[in-house]
Each structure stands twice: as C-alpha cells, then as structure tokens.
Image (cartoon, rainbow, N blue to C red):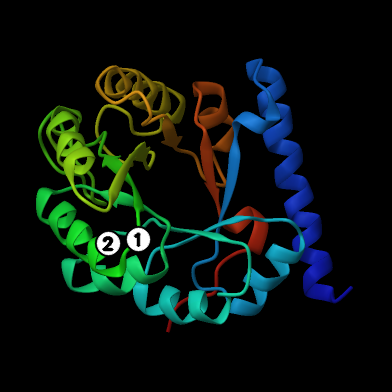
Amino acid sequence: MTDRKAQLAANLAQVEERIASACVAAGRKREEVTLIVVTKTYPASDVRILSELGVRDVAENRDQDAAPKAAECADLPLRWHFVGQLQTNKVRSVVGYADVVQSVDRSKLVTSLSTAAVRAERELGCLIQVALDAGENGRGERGGVGPGGIGELAALVADAPGLRLDGLMTVAPLNGPYADRQQAAFERLMDLSTDLRRAHPAANMVSAGMSADLEQAVAAGATHVRVGTAVLGVRPRLG
C-alpha cells in the first residue's frame, strides 16, 4: 500500500467511524447516510485510490477541474456530484459527466440543464440549493434560493425533460439567523424537505453537512454528507 493510499484509508476510516457514531446517537441505520467525498483541488490519482477504497460518490465544484478529472476516471464505478455555483456557459460540459447537480438555484439554470441533458440523452438528478441566509425569497451569498422559492423551482425541475428532482441541499450559513447554528439550520432544511415531499414524494435526498458539522447533519436527518478535508487533508492554497 502506498503512503497516500494508507493515509486516505486511515482518514476514510475515521470519517466512517464518525458517521456510524452519529447514526447510533440519532437512532438511525448507517445505510441511511451516503458519504460523498469532495475531491476538489485533488488529483485524479486520489479519486482512483478512493474508488479502490470503496468510495462510490465524489463531488467537484469547478467544471474546469472536474471535467478532465472525470474523463480520466471514466472507467471507475463512480457517481459524480457537481456542488458549486454553476454558470450556464458551463452546463453542457457538466452534464457530460455529472450524475447529480446539487446547486440548482434559478429557473434559467433549469432550462439550460434540461436542454443539455436532452441533447446528451442523459437523465440528470437535481437538488434545489436552499439558502438559509437569504430571507424567504432572497438569494444566498454562496448561491441558493430562499425557502420561499423552493416550490416554484422544484416544479420547473420536475416538469423539465431530462431532469429528475432528487431533493434539497444546503451549506451551513455564515450569516443570518442560522449563523453558527448548524443543527438548527439542518433541521430547518429537513422541515423544508418534508414540505417538498408532499408535492414530490420521490424527492427525498437531503444533502447537508461537511467535515466540521457532519454529526449535526446526521442528527437532523440528512441522507448525504459532503466531506472533503477530513478525508483528503487540508487543501493546498490555490496559486
């Protein structure tokens, strides 16, 4: 085993233990929570090692990094999640490799994703990104739509050819009423998920929690946690 593989295996085991413990504390089954490893800024060689270690879900937030990495790892049994703010001029590229886009937050993006998915003859999973720092109908500092905009956007996704409405995503907000209140933020997201599932029963995916707050996300009921640093290490500074 290479040094890097041993390091990633040890980190992955620690994260797995954290998720398992959080599930026990929350009275949940471990299989209810999917780990997504955020591989941004790390090379395709790390993605390949993670796949060897049993990881099946990976995430990226910049198309210019993700597209070549996904192409290099196209032989691996991975599901790719796009989690960054997505500009419409990158949509065609992202639809080429992403299985799920977790950052859907405006109608123009829905239209572009649908057009690209139909052209590529793919079905693309979509999560509505919810901004809990935005007020009811505002937009978040790091993307996302306020809670009041979820219903309209979800209906657009559900009706769009080539798209599948999978659920909701949020990032713990740095400002607003939920700043430094990750547990409360994730519980609010779960309430919004309950509301969404009344109209769209199959949209039951809830993506919340990262390296620092995955326990709070599991406690609240998240189905997916997005962990980067705790698995891959502190990210190198970008030049």
Q: Amino acid at mark 2?
A: Ala
Marks 2,1: beta carbons within 8 A: yes
Count of marks, rendered view:
2
Q: Does residue 144 sit above or below 82 in this rendering?
A: above
Residue 190 seen: yes
Residue under label 2, please give it. 117
Q: Give the class, few, some or many, for how many residues have Cα within 10 Å of label 1's Cα (few <14, many ≥20).
A: some
Residue under label 1, please give it. 122
Label 2 element class: helix
Labelled disc at residue 33: none
Left or right, residue 65 beside residue 51: left
Q: Quadrant of residue 193?
A: top left
Instruction: From the top left corner, tell me how far across and down residue 38 is, in percent.
Output: 53, 59
Label 1 element class: loop
> Which residue is located at x 25 percent, y 49 percent?
104
Tell me the quadrant of the picture where the C terminus can be found: bottom left
